[in-house]
Image (cartoon, rainbow, N blue to C red):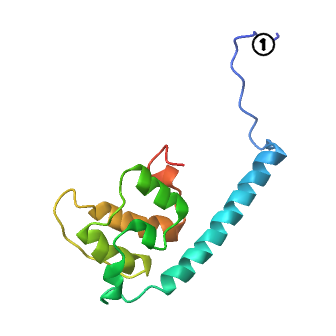
Amino acid sequence: MTPSADSKPTAPKQGVTVKKPVGVTKRRQLQRAKESDELVQLRQRIAALPPPSSVEAEGFRFFRELPISKKTLDALTAAGWVERTEIQRAALIPGLQGREVLGAAKTGSGKTLAFVIPVRDEGGTHWSEIAPGLN
């Protein structure tokens, strides 16, 4: 019996390897290498940050001044986040430095963002996993 034109394609049999086009695999490898290099650079910039309690650390008012990935900065800019809130000024630098952070602030002050940015940038999580559509 021959398949009809409107029949659905079947999934490969278990144990059968489906090869991806070479170009797709190569692009993914290049993208991962680029992200890995960016992560190394971010870690170096984070290591150079002043202690969070210093006056110098308070000078980082804008997200663009922080050692965060370009993808993160682009997503923040697209969402309208340019200047950090009080809780973000207090929590982001220690968070980026891998320190434990405990903070309290009113609803809508940007607490979640203050905790997600260090996790996203250090953990290598892709924005598409946190907020689908932000690739």
Label 1: which residue? 3
How many numbered discs?
Answer: 1
Task: Residue type at mark 1: give it.
Answer: Pro
Image: 126 above or below 2: below
x, y percentage for residue 92? 36, 73
At x 77%, y 51%, the residue is 25
Query: What residue appears at the point 70 percent right and 65 percent down from the top-left corner?
Result: 33
Residue at x-position 41% and y-position 56%: 76
**Relative vertical location of residue 60 with respect to residue 112 in this rendering, above or below:** below
Q: Quadrant of residue 32?
A: bottom right
* Above or below, comparing residue 92 to residue 19 in the picture: below
Q: Quadrant of residue 101 in the image? A: bottom left
Quarter that holds the N terminus: top right
Residue at position x 18%, y 67% in the image: 105
Left or right of residue 90, residue 49 in this image: right
Looking at the rendered structure, the secondary structure element under dot 1 is loop
Front in this rendered view, residue 27 or 57: 57
Task: Residue 100 in the image: state x and y as whole percent.
Answer: 34, 80
Q: Determine whether 4 is above or below 72 in the image.
A: above
User: In the image, residue 42 lies at what x, y percent?
Assistant: 55, 75
Q: Residues within 10 Å of mark 1 (few under 14, many from 20)?
A: few
Q: Position of residue 20 (x, y in %)?
A: 79, 43
Q: Is residue 43 left or right of residue 11?
A: left
The front one of 88 and 103 is 88
